[in-house]
Image (cartoon, grey):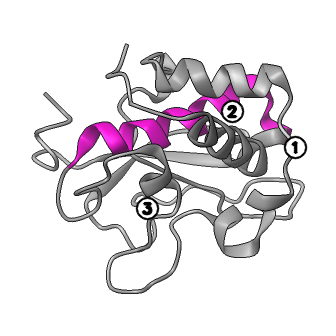
Amino acid sequence: MGRRIKHTENDVNSLARLMLAEAIGEGVEGMDMVGTVVANRVEADCEPDFTNLRNIRHAIYQTIPGTGIPHFEPVLNGALYTQRPTEEDLQRARNLLQGHRNPRARMNLWFFNPSPGQAYRDPCTPTMPRSPMTQFDFAHKNHCFYVGVPGYCPEFYR
């Protein structure tokens, strides 16, 4: 269980759309893992990557520090705005916002797809690109998941 995140129905819809855009081909577990990482970022509230993310929309629309580039590809390429979540998708997002987290991704603050648009996943890198304070944790279908290095974000890794 994670911390409950205060939310509106617009937040639920935005999280469900992000989960679909990022991981629809990876099934329910893949979408849950993606949603868990987004919720974890709000819960973490640590510098420099996730400070002042007070709600789920802050996390979804966050940019990479100093670049203005969105963290999440579906925000950058517009795929976030074309998704039409079902009631099941919305309930999955509500559950995450109410504190339920995917157990496997419970400690992950990053993920990425190293080979978007390909039928296979390129190997995961030891650290997340552009995020040197990370270390590879596990892969699930097309995504690589990362945790912080020891000492990073003690507010979250307690």
Q: Which amino acid does label 3 sit on?
A: Met
Q: What residue type is labelled 1?
A: Arg
Callout 3: helix, strand or loop?
loop
- The residue that appears at 51% across and 66% down in the rendered structure is 71
Q: Give the residue at mark 3.
A: 128
Count residues near mark 2 (Cα–Cα under 10 Å), then give few for <14, some for 14-19, many for 20+: many
What count of labels does the image hold? 3
| Residue 92: percent from left, percent from top | 67, 22
Q: Earlier in the sequence, mark 2 or mark 1?
A: 2
Q: Which quarter shows the C terminus?
A: top left
Mark 3 and mark 1: span between their CA atoms? 30 Å
For residue 62, above or below residue 148: below
Mark 2 and mark 1: span between their CA atoms? 18 Å
Mark 2–mark 3 contact, CB under 8 Å? no
Q: What residue type is labelled 2?
A: Gly
Which disc number belongs to residue 60?
Answer: none
Q: Which of marks 2 and 3 is nearer the N terminus?
A: 2
Which disc number belongs to residue 84?
Answer: 1
- Quadrant of residue 24 within the rendered picture: top right
Q: Earlier in the sequence, mark 3 or mark 1?
A: 1
Q: Which of 139 and 48 is in front in this view?
A: 48
Mark 2 and mark 3: span between their CA atoms? 18 Å
Q: What stretch is highlighted in magenta?
A: 25-45
Q: Give the residue at mark 2.
A: 30
For residue 82, above or below residue 157: below
Count residues near mark 3 (Cα–Cα under 10 Å), then give few for <14, some for 14-19, many for 20+: many
For residue 68, above or below residue 102: below
Callout 2: helix, strand or loop?
helix
Residue 36 falls within the magenta-colored stretch: yes
Q: Give the residue at the far bottom of this rendering.
A: 67
